[in-house]
Image: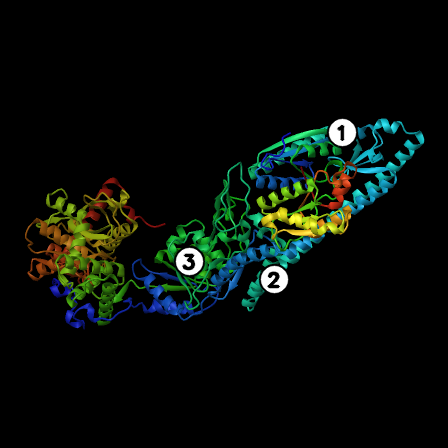
Amino acid sequence: MSAADPAGRIRRIAVALDASPHSLQGLALAAGIAAALNAELEGVFVEDTELLRLAGLPFLRELRIATLCESTLDVDRLQRELRAAARGVRERLERTAAELGVAWSFRVWRGDLEAEILGAALDAELFALGRIGRFAPLRRRPRPTAPKPTHDGLLLGVLYSGSEGSTRALSIALELGIRHAASLVVILQPATSADTATLRNRALEQLGPVREQTRLVSLEATDSAALAATVRNLGMDLLILDETNSLLARASLWTSLETLGCPVAIGR
Amino acid sequence: MSVAPLEPSALYRQCDPAQLALETTADLDVRDGLIAQDRAIQAVRFGVGIRHTGYNLFALGPSGTGKYALIRSALQERATHEAVPPDWCYVFNFEDAHRPRALRLPPGKGAELKRDMDQLVEDLHRAIQGVFESDEYRTRTQALEEELEERQEQAMGQIRELAKEKDVILLQTPTGFTLAPVRDGKPLGPNEFHALSDEDRARIEEDINSLQAEMRKALHQMPLWKKRSDERIEALNREMAAAATQSLIEALCETYGDLAAVVAYLRQVQEDVVENFRQFLPESDKQPPLLGIWIPPNPDGPPWHQRYRINVLLGHDKNGGAPVVYADLPAHHQLVGRIEHRAHLGALETDFTMIRAGALHQANGGYLIIDALKLLIQPLAWETLKRLLQAAEIRIESLAQITSLISTLSLEPEPIPLDVKVVMLGERHVYYLLCELDPEFSELFKVAVDFEDQLVRGPESHLVYARFVASEVRRAGLRHFDRAAVARVIEHSARLADDNERLTSHMRSIGDLVRESDYWAGADGCETVGAAHVQQAIDAKIARADRISRRLREETTRGTILIETDGARVGQVNGLAVMSLGGFAFGHPSRITARVRLGKGELIDIEREVKLGGPIHSKGVLILQGFIAGRYALDHPLSLSASLVFEQSYGGIEGDSASSAELYALLSALADLPIRQSLAVTGSVNQLGEVQAIGGVNEKIEGFFDTCAARGPLEGQGVLIPVSNVKHLMLRADVREAVAQGRFAVYPIASIDEGIEILTGTAAGERTSDGRFPDGSVNARVEARLIGFSERLRALHAQDGKTPPSERAEP
């Protein structure tokens, strides 16, 4: 996979997809960003082998939502359904990309969902991720976004801890904010409260000419609950994290995403 | 018993221009110039004044007598002061779309309501879109949706938490949910599961079954929650739509507060709009393409919105008075209105906006004038008119519906109450036929307005005519007529009436004469129309139409048609006939001959035998037989066999005006006395020998005059006419001049005896006290001939040993 080009421009944005409305919302978001950055949009669909593995347990039942029918898990059927879902997602991706004039590609990965997603995230310059597949939200529809009285565009958040990775994430957020005409919120995550001012100055320095339009928010606590509260309160559409962020650890990936309540973009 | 020919003054009654108090028609200030028809006007006043069912009017009289103009004028005058009828609109029927409702509105309000409703639809668009795009609506619907989502999420979350306690995980599949055992956060596959102890496997299975039961229960609740949520959202939608609609409808209700029907309609509109608010949202404007073809949007707006429009079937000017309508094409659909259709995607469709008014709608509350003949020749139009007048309502139905030719679903507009006074115009025979053949006619048209076809000639009627000429001049922008020209018009009117004591009321002919005179005055470069121009117009009109009469005259002159105009012949007389072709009548002489011989008392009319004689003609001939039988040889059987014929007549003959001529020919033949061929005869005769009036006397005299004149100078020719026709004489100037110079004569005859004397130059003779006619007289010769026939017949029978039939003893 290609890395970011020497000028630091993001050339490819990947987005994890399934057939749920949440995922389609993420697709629209990623496509908008790809269009703004003139980058290629890549859809990633994972055929979850863990789900297929469960078909070996005959006492498990699958309950369908729309028809309220139930049946045993059947490998062949599940595979067909996953392929059908992939096809549907691909068509949607193609349509969305065509509408925005964005180059696109689509890949189907097969394996354990978490592993494949994280693997795909490592492979992209920017990876948009929401809860998908067997870990999709229990809600059928995405939660409506809160009214944004001060602006009409996207509200992007970036978690900045001063690390190299978070600096890279901030620069991605900055480019996105400028290209995408989005509002930017920098969430400062100092190691200690004493570091807050230093961290703020470094962030402002990096923000340069857009510092006046950018809001800086400090986290009071270091846990994910505090971050989620901030994200929710501000009504963020996307939170940009660097790949090394502990929230993206495999064991806590889906929990973190559930807690945050908004898609994340993993920048490298 | 000698009868003197008429003086020239008796042949024509002039109109003295000096009696006319005008120099030219410019001196007369006239508006309509209608001919006074006092009886007709009285009848019209009565007919329009009486407001009961069935008192419609039938104006009867010859065409061209100004019936329409007079009726229209009289109705217009009255209608101006009458109340303006209400406006009628058709609106959508929200309860039954196929039966549009009729709305009655005060005059002028129809168009107002239409404008208001058009505006309302636009306002509703804005208002409804506004409320459904408002933050309030979005927030409230999202809140309701969120509530449902949260409830569902909560239910599934509870399952998930329950599962977590039992080392089971709730997972999503592409189409639903499933539960799986989990160890260290990772679902157990078949291998790991089977590696567990039996006890653990059993417990897990039991847990999962129990959780699945819970999940099943939760999932089955969800459709119910969804339904309730949808109902609440729909209620919210209605609330929002009602809020958007309320103020707009209220404003209109206030405007039309005094019109309960309109307010009720507006309330229905309000309910319908709330019910169908989605039709006002932008998505509803989009029409799906059909077979890949984009259908352009309707320029009148979305089809749905048509239902809120107003079809002003009939709008009135509130200051206009009652309507007076003339139905120039009284076909069924022109009377009752029609429902139009438009082609749409290969099918015909319609709605209440395509209902169109008919003449009855337009005249409702006022007067409708219809030409009877035009009405009667239109299929079912007369039946329809009667039915609607009887029902007192206008029901719009097509002929196809009435005759059940088409049974497709169509509109049935609500009938509109009918209050109209119908005036039918027609010829007299149409009126009498309707009276006789249609019992309903007399029920519905109780007022007969009978137009005179003649006016009594006198100073008053002369003035009326002058006014009429003046009005025609003004109306058509013609040159003014000088008094002599007006006088000539009046004289021609008397000629058209065939009566020097009457004037025609056929004003169309007079109007034509006025316009044609103006043309000739223009051709002469005159500023004013003079008598010469009027005469020129009369002559030119005759010249345009007299081709047949000229041909007949030519053929007579050339000897093809045998007519003698001098000398004398036994049993031969010149009769006079009138032919009328294309509105032009002319007279022409016909040779009538009679031959007699011994016979059985029969008088053979050859015309009748070959069925060329009409019934009146045959009647006239039979009267001759009665006259002969009743006058001569009363003690002897009538042993005559006579034949009468119109020579060189190859068409039908009708009328009894030649019966006197036939009698003269017969008497001449019986008396063996020649008849002067320089004379022609007209007049009917009765059994007593009295000569009776006939029609077309002027044409007959002029016809014989022209025939004689065409052969050379006139030398004492003349015509015998009934004395009772003298008052009808309005002869041409050249005829009058010839009479004045003694070259032509017109003899007024009262009896056959007077006529036969002139024709034969022999006295007719009256029966003396001894019962005999004077010797040598015509009648004596006739009687002697008949007695001779009788005795000869008796002698013949004696030779044969038979008794003549008339002498046989009665049983």
Q: Which residue is mark 3?
A: B435
Type of the residue with mark 2: Gln
Query: What is the tally of numbered marks visible in this picture?
Result: 3
Q: Quadrant of residue A99?
A: top right
Q: B763 or A57: which is nearer to us?
A: A57
Q: Specify whether B76 is left or right of B620.
A: right
Reply above or below: B161 against B383.
Answer: above
Report which quarter residue A118 is drawn in: top right
- Please name whichever residue, B570 or A159, is drawn nearer the observer in this view of the structure: A159
Q: In the image, what residue type sits under mark 1?
A: Thr
Using the numbered discs, state the Cα–Cα distance from disc 2 to disc 1 in whole angstroms. 59 Å
Identity, as a three-letter code, of the amino acid under mark 3 = Cys
* Distance between mark 1 and mark 3 Cα atoms: 101 Å
Residue to which mark 1 is pinned: A49
Left or right for B213, reference B243? right
> How dense is the environment of label 2, judged by Cα within 10 Å: few (below 14), some, or many (20 and up)?
some
Residue A90: tell me if it is visible. Answer: yes
Kindly report which numbered mark, 2 or 3, lies closer to the viewer in this rendering. 2
Label 1 element class? helix
**In percent of the image, x 43 and y 70: which residue is there?**
B82
The secondary structure type at the circle numbered 2 is helix
Image side of residue B458 versus residue B123, left or right: left
Chain identifier of the residue bearing label 2 in the image: B
Q: Position of residue B90 (x, y in %)?
A: 52, 57
> Chain for mark 1?
A
Residue B246 numbered tag? 2
Question: Residue A15 occupies which quadrant of the picture?
Answer: top right
